[in-house]
Image: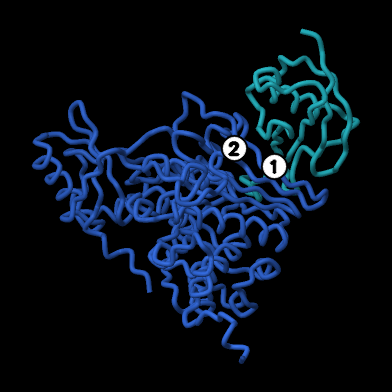
C-alpha cells in the first residue's frame, strides 16, 4: 500500500513533525518506530528505571490506536497522531 | 420598593441547598450515595475533598499505607504531625473529611485492595474510584468490578500530567489495555509479594498537587454522573462521560484531549461475571471452614463442594539453605510480614518456599479455622464449585461490617 503523510506530535515535549506511513501499520508498530528513533530522544524509563509505556491516538478521530491499523480506523492523510506517555505513578519491584 | 421585594434569595440552610439550584442535581441520590475511594495519596486527597464538599452521603476510604513527610507537598488533608506520628492515611483522611463536612458519613479501612476487601463491599457501592500508584491494584479493582458489572473510575498522575478513564465491564477493560510487558511486570509484582524473598519498594515518581487537583476533580465529576445515572443515553439529562474513554492532560504543553479506548479483547482474564449472587445471612467471615463446607453440602446437595481460594492458605515455610521447616497457619498475604518479623531470611539471597492449599474441600485439615483466618475478607463473595455448576455466595452475615459514621 502506498505510504501517506501524517503529522505526529509528541505530547509531553510538544515536538511535531511529519511521518510517512503505510496505512496498514498498527498503532503499536508506530509507537515502536518512534521509540527506536534516536533523534527523538524519547525517555524509555522513569526515574526509578521502570519502562515507560506509550500510547498513540488520533486527534481527528478521538481514538486510541494500538492493535488497530491506521486504515482500519479511517485515519487519513494529514491527520495528527499524538504520542502520549502512559501514566501509572510508579511502582518498582526489585 | 425595597431591594428584598424583587430579589430572589434562596434560603441556604444545609451545605447542599446551593446545589439544588442546579437543574439536574438530585439531592437525595447524592446524600444516599455510597462511594469507595481506593488509595488516599495525592489523588485520593483531592477526590475526597471534592466528594466531601459535594455532600456525598457515605464515603469509604481504603488504604494500607502510613503518612510520610514526602506526602505533605501534595496532600491537603494531611499535616506535619500526621507524618511525625506515622499515622494511617485512611484514618486521617476520614477524620479530615469529617472536619470539612460533618454531614458526610465516612468509614476507613486499613486494607490491601488485592485481598482485603470483599466483593460484597464493591457490590454495595454506587461509585468506585481508584486513586492508585500501581498496576496490580488497578488490575484487582478491574477484575472485581467486572465480576459485578460495575463501572470504576481510574485516575493517574505524574509530573504535570494525568489521565482518567471510566472502565465499563463488557465495553472497556483495564486488563485489555495492558501491554504484554506490563502484564509481565504485574506477574513479577505478584510473585514477589507471594514468595516473600524480595522486597517491594514503592516508587518515587514525582507528582504535583496541580495534576492531582485536575485529575481528582475529573474523577469526582465522573462519580457524580454515575451516582445520578446520567450519560449520553439518559433521558433526564444529557451528559458526556468518560465511559470507555480516556481524558489526558499534559500540563507542560497544555495538551488536553479525550480519546475513545480500543475495543475489548476476546480473550482476557478479567472478563468473568458473577451472576446470580446468593446472599447467605448465616455465613460471615467468622464462620469456620467446617461450617462453610457443611452449609455448601446441605444447600447444594453436594457431598464434595470445592471452594477455590483467592490467595493460598500457607501451612508450611521452608528455608532453602537450612531446609528448616516451619509450621504456620497463614493466608499468603501475611507471609511476608511473618518472615520479616521472625527474621527467617538469614541473608538477602535466602529463599523461603511456601506450601499451601489453593482450595477448601472436605479434605482441608484445618476446618476449625475461621474464613477470616484463612484469608477471606468480610462480605466476600465466595465461589463454590459443585458438580457441573458454579455458585456465588456472599457472606451476607457481615452486612454490619460497613458502618459509616
| Residue at the disc numbered 1 | A50
Query: Image check: B270 left or right of B244?
Result: left
Residue B321 in sight from this viewpoint: no
Taking the spot 20% from the left edge, 38% from the top edge, the residue there is B361
> Do labels 2 and 1 touch, CB within 8 Å?
yes
Query: Image check: A70 left or right of B199?
Result: right
Which residue ends up furthest to the right in the rendered image?
A: A39
Q: Secondary structure at mark 1?
A: loop
Picture disc at residue A60: none
Query: Image check: A72 left or right of A17?
Result: left
Residue A57: x, y in percent?
Answer: 71, 33
Picture disc at residue B185: 2
Residue B129: x, y in percent?
Answer: 51, 54
Taking the spot 68% from the left edge, 50% from the top edge, the residue there is B162
Alpha carbon separation for disc pair 2 and 1: 9 Å
Judge by depth and name the residue closer to the eye, B279 or B133: B279
Query: In the picture, residue B104 is in which quadrant?
Result: bottom left
Amino acid at each position: 500500500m502506498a505510504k501517506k503523510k501524517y503529522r505526529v506530535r509528541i505530547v509531553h515535549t510538544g515536538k511535531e513533525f511529519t511521518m510517512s506511513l503505510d496505512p496498514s501499520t498498527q498503532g503499536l508498530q508506530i509507537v515502536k518506530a518512534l521509540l527506536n528513533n534516536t533523534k527523538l530522544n524519547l525517555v524509555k524509563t522513569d526515574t526509578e528505571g521502570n519502562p515507560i509505556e506509550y500510547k498513540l491516538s488520533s486527534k481527528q478521530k478521538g481514538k486510541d490506536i494500538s492493535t488497530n491499523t491506521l486504515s482500519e480506523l479511517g485515519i487519513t492523510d494529514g491527520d495528527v497522531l499524538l504520542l502520549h506517555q502512559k501514566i501509572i505513578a510508579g511502582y518498582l519491584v526489585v | 420598593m425595597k431591594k428584598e421585594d424583587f430579589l430572589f434569595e434562596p434560603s441556604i440552610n444545609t451545605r447542599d441547598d446551593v446545589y439544588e439550584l442546579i437543574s439536574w442535581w438530585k439531592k437525595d441520590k447524592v446524600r444516599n450515595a455510597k462511594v469507595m475511594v481506593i488509595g488516599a495519596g495525592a489523588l485520593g486527597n483531592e477526590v475526597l475533598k471534592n466528594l466531601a464538599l459535594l455532600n456525598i452521603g457515605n464515603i469509604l476510604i481504603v488504604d494500607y499505607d502510613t503518612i510520610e513527610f514526602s506526602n505533605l507537598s501534595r496532600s491537603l488533608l494531611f499535616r506535619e504531625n500526621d507524618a511525625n506520628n506515622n499515622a494511617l492515611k485512611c484514618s486521617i483522611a476520614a477524620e479530615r473529611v469529617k472536619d470539612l463536612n460533618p454531614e458526610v458519613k465516612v468509614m476507613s479501612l486499613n486494607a490491601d485492595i488485592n485481598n482485603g476487601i470483599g466483593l460484597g463491599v464493591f457490590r454495595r457501592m454506587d461509585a468506585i474510584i481508584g486513586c492508585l500508584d500501581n498496576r496490580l491494584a488497578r488490575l484487582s479493582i478491574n477484575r472485581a468490578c467486572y465480576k459485578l458489572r460495575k463501572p470504576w473510575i481510574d485516575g493517574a498522575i505524574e509530573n504535570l500530567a494525568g489521565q482518567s478513564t471510566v472502565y465499563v465491564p463488557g465495553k472497556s477493560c483495564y486488563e485489555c489495555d495492558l501491554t504484554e510487558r506490563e502484564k509481565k511486570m504485574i506477574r513479577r509484582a505478584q510473585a514477589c509479594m507471594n514468595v516473600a524473598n524480595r522486597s517491594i519498594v514503592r516508587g518515587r515518581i514525582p507528582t504535583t498537587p496541580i495534576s492531582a487537583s485536575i485529575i481528582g476533580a475529573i474523577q469526582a465529576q465522573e462519580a457524580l454522573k454515575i451516582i445520578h445515572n446520567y450519560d449520553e443515553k439518559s433521558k433526564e439529562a444529557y451528559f458526556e462521560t468518560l465511559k470507555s474513554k480516556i481524558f489526558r492532560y499534559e500540563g507542560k504543553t497544555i495538551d488536553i484531549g479525550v480519546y475513545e479506548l480500543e475495543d475489548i479483547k476476546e480473550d482476557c482474564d478479567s472478563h468473568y461475571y458473577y451472576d446470580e449472587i446468593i446472599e447467605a445471612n448465616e455465613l460471615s467471615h467468622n464462620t469456620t471452614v467446617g461450617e462453610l463446607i457443611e452449609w455448601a453440602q446441605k444447600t447444594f446437595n453436594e457431598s464434595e463442594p470445592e471452594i477455590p481460594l483467592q490467595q493460598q492458605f500457607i501451612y508450611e515455610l521452608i528455608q532453602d539453605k537450612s531446609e528448616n521447616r516451619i509450621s504456620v497457619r497463614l493466608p499468603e498475604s501475611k507471609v511476608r510480614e511473618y518472615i520479616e518479623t521472625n527474621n527467617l531470611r538469614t541473608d538477602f539471597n535466602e529463599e523461603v518456599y511456601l506450601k499451601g492449599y489453593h482450595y477448601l474441600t472436605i479434605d482441608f485439615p484445618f476446618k476449625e479455622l475461621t474464613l477470616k483466618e484463612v484469608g477471606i475478607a468480610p462480605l466476600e463473595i465466595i465461589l463454590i464449585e459443585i458438580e457441573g455448576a458454579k455458585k456465588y455466595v456472599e457472606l451476607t452475615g457481615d452486612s454490619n461490617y460497613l458502618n459509616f459514621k
